[in-house]
Image (cartoon, grey):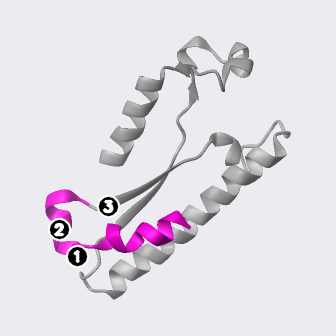
């Protein structure tokens, strides 16, 4: 619903602006556990379902925003919709599960954010 409110602002400027700035980016924080095909462990029903719903909503938005940009013939800027997985970040939230994470797969908040920003700038 937030994307619906911000879409007109992201689309403003028309496609001609993309040469200078690239497409606008609508990014969400998702998680790998939201993947239906990659669920080999089960559990975490509510969290998995909420992330799967987020991913599906973003997919729908990407289709609709892409269609808007094409139909407008350059009047609306393209919007890249990105679901970002930050990895396992060393925070109090992930602390109970960190013992199962290889040290090289446990990221600092700064490393995680830099990686996600690089994807958005991509």
Q: Is residue 48 magenta?
A: no
The residue lying toward the viewer, choosing from 11 and 2, is 2
The reply to whether residue 122 is visible in this rendering is no
Element type at mark 2: helix
Circle 2/circle 1 CB separation < 8 Å: yes
Neighbours of disc 1 within 10 Å: few (<14), some (14-19), many (20+): some
The residues tagged by marks 2 and 1 sit, at their Cα atoms, a distance apart of 6 Å
Q: Which mark is residue 17?
A: 2
Q: Which mark is residue 14?
A: 1
Q: Which mark is residue 24?
A: 3
Q: Residue at x 14, y 60 (%)?
A: 20
The reply to whether residue 54 is visible in this rendering is yes
Horizontal and vertical percent position of residue 5: 46, 70
Q: Residue at x 48, y 65 (%)?
A: 3
Horizontal and vertical percent position of residue 71: 35, 87
Q: Quadrant of residue 101?
A: top right
The residues tagged by marks 3 and 1 sit, at their Cα atoms, a distance apart of 10 Å
Q: Which mark is residue 76?
A: none
Q: Is residue 20 magenta?
A: yes
Name which of mark 2 and mark 3 comes first in the sequence. 2
Q: Is residue 65 above or below residue 104?
A: below
Circle 3/circle 1 CB separation < 8 Å: no
**Number of marks in picture:** 3
Horizontal and vertical percent position of residue 81: 45, 60
- The residue range painted magenta reads 1-22
Horizontal and vertical percent position of residue 94: 66, 24
The residue lying toward the viewer, choosing from 9 and 111, is 9
Q: Residue at x 71, y 53 (%)?
A: 50
Q: Main secondary structure of the magenta part?
A: helix
């Amino acid at each position: 619903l937030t994307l619906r409110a911000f879409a007109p602002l992201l689309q403003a400027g028309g496609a001609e602006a993309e040469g200078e700035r690239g497409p606008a980016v609508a990014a969400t924080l998702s998680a790998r556990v939201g993947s239906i095909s990659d669920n080999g462990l089960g559990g975490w029903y509510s969290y998995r379902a909420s992330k799967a719903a987020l991913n599906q909503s973003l997919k729908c938005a990407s289709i609709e925003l892409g269609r808007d940009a094409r139909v407008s013939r350059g009047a609306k800027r393209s919007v890249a919709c990105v679901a970002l997985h930050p990895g396992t970040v060393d925070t109090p939230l992930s602390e109970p599960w960190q013992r199962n994470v290889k040290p090289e797969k446990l990221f600092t908040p700064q490393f995680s954010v830099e990686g996600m920003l690089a994807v958005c700038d991509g």
